[in-house]
Amino acid sequence: MTTQTDKKQMRSAARLYAVQALFQMEVSGQTVETIQREFETHRFGEVFDDVEMAEGDSRHFRAVVDGAVNYQARIDQMTDRALVAKWPIDRIDPVLRAVFRAAGAELVDMDTPPKVTINEYVDVAKAFFPEGKESKFVNAVLDHMAREARPAAFPA
């Protein structure tokens, strides 16, 4: 039986996999269908360096990746508005770009509460950049994006 905690962990894993998939799509030029199939077939639950990767929520993974692809222009524009003028989205680290696109998909196209989206993707950023300041940067940018995408969730 799958508990609520299991479902949350599977959704968190799906977010991490979605960021990896979006990054891989950008650097390899592979199609969304090819990447999704590869992740669901080979990455979910994979054993890597004697550590078993978490099983991901396949539906959530697909929804995030599809949303990031379908709404990429809108998400990138929101991200650009949240960034400093000297640092447009195409100048930032491609992993961070993937984080912003995945989180943007949840802010634009899904019912995930904005604070949950922000917290989850800050944790994803910490997984990729455990020593850096990137998680604080991600928090600030996503807060700005969430206020733009869902102003009703942030009463004055």
Image (tube, rainbow, N blue to C red):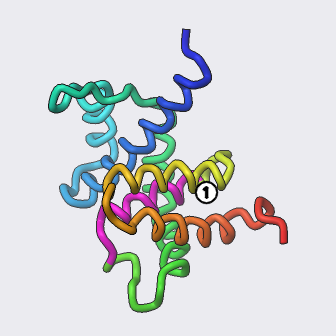
For residue 82, above or below residue 111: below
Q: Report x, y in % for residue 17.
A: 36, 41
Q: Is residue 103 magenta?
A: yes
- Taking the image as shown, residue 119 lies to the left or right of residue 38, namely right
For residue 85, above or below residue 70: below
Camera-side residue of 115 and 76: 115
Which residue is disc 1 drawn over? 107
Residue at figure coordinates x 50%, y 73% from the top left: 79
- Taking the image as shown, residue 4 lies to the left or right of residue 28, namely right
Residue at figure coordinates x 48%, y 46% from the top left: 64
Check disc 1 and give the amino acid type.
Answer: Leu
Camera-side residue of 87 and 72: 87
Q: Is residue 75 magenta?
A: no
In what element is the residue under mark 1?
helix
Direction bottom: furthest residue:
86
Q: Report x, y in % for residue 63.
A: 50, 42
Q: Report x, y in % for residue 12.
A: 48, 38
Direction front: furthest residue:
131
The magenta segment is 92-106
For residue 80, above or below residue 11: below
The quadrant of the rendering that contains the C terminus is bottom right
- Taking the image as shown, residue 120 lies to the left or right of residue 20, namely right
The quadrant of the rendering that contains the N terminus is top right
- Taking the image as shown, residue 112 lies to the left or right of residue 125, namely right
For label 1, count other residues whose C-alpha is less than 10 Å away and answer few (under 14), some (14-19) or many (20+): many
Q: Quadrant of residue 133?
A: bottom left
Residue at figure coordinates x 68%, y 49% from the top left: 113
